[in-house]
Amino acid sequence: MSIHGPAASVTVSQRCLVACQESEPSDRLILLDEERELGVTAGDLGRRIRRVAGGLEALGHGPGQVLALWAPNMPPWAGVLFGAWTAGMAVTPIGVAASDEEVERQLVETGASVLVAAPGLMPRATALASRVDVRTIVSLGPAAGAVSILSLLESPPLAVSRDDPDATALLPYSSGTTGGPKAVQLTHRQLAAVAAQLQSRLRFDRADVVLGVPPFSHILGLTGTLTVPLLAGAQVVTLPRFDPRTTLDVIARRGVTVVIGAPSMVDALARGVAVHGAETSSVRLVLAGGSALMPDVQARASLAFPRAVVGQGWG
């Protein structure tokens, strides 16, 4: 059965470019790397998306091909993800904890022609790419034997988006309810519908500061804490790994308004507040996803985040 809704005609990447262009002012920070204290403005993100797309096209990559993205949560995720989509490519995200065998299997099964990796993963990425049919390796930092992301950012920008609403946009790996992890095929049309549905309930706006802790390689992190907030003009603060004390400090220092994560993360934060104390009055929403939020965890979170609505998006 095919379902067509009002969100179908415009892709998420096209919407993101419009959001970047319409952001006032364009020098407003919308992505913040908490670990390295680096920021990306709305104007920068729009330019990076088009230049990444142009660079990929110049290297011979485009519609029908797949880009694999292997990196912890960091601002370049957005430029590469939306840039690949703008070039008409599908993206398959790879979890940073994946083994060599799992990464190789994902590259083979998705037929990835490009592998983009964080600097710390480049030695493994280079070795794995040499064993499969990956034509181009891109490093998100300096690395020998790979195309630097900086060279893509110096490319002439792609003027017109190549993404097609009915083309495959995302190939995340999930075990679902049975068997081992497998590619889940999601089109641009489906992602646009999901983004519209989430925004209708979460109601992100430009006053929001969203904690980007759940891995962007997982659909929860990718949609709830990266793509949908950026479409709404919210600021996303990225953390490459979860640590309760560090995360609570970031919530207080950055005035985080939205916390989304697995129930175990929500519980760890709530227990951290109970033991160590933390300023959480800025948080308006705590949302658990990925598995069921048990009543005792919800009760603890409600005490730890007294001004927030605590709920779940799962089931």
Image (cartoon, rainbow, N blue to C red):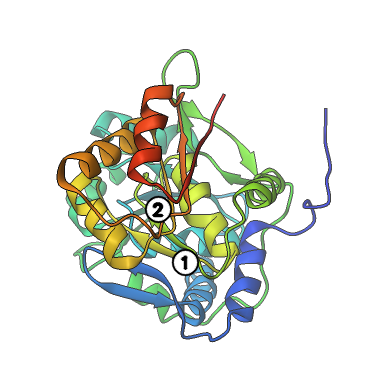
Q: Position of residue 103 (x, y in %)?
A: 32, 36
Q: Dot 1: what SS?
A: loop
Left or right: residue 128 versus residue 94 is left
At 68% across and 45% down in the image, what residue appears? 197
Identity of the amino acid at label 1? Leu
Q: Quadrant of the N terminus?
A: top right
**With respect to residue 98, does 213 lie above or below?**
below
Residue 294: in sight, yes or no? no
Residue 185's disc number: none
At 29% across and 55% down in the image, what residue appears? 239
Q: Position of residue 174 (x, y in %)?
A: 46, 28
At 46% across and 52% down in the image, what residue appears? 225
Left or right: residue 85 versus residue 39 is right
Distance, label 1 to label 2, CA atoms, is 10 Å
Identity of the amino acid at label 2? Arg
Q: Position of residue 121 (x, y in %)?
A: 22, 50
**With respect to residue 306, does 26 lie above or below?**
below
- The local crowd at label 2, few if under 14, some if 14 to 19, many if 20 or more residues have their Cα within 10 Å, is some
Q: Position of residue 241 (x, y in %)?
A: 24, 48
Report which residue position mark 2 lands on: 135
Q: Dot 2: what SS?
A: loop
**With respect to residue 14, does 298 lie above or below?**
above
Residue 59's disc number: 1
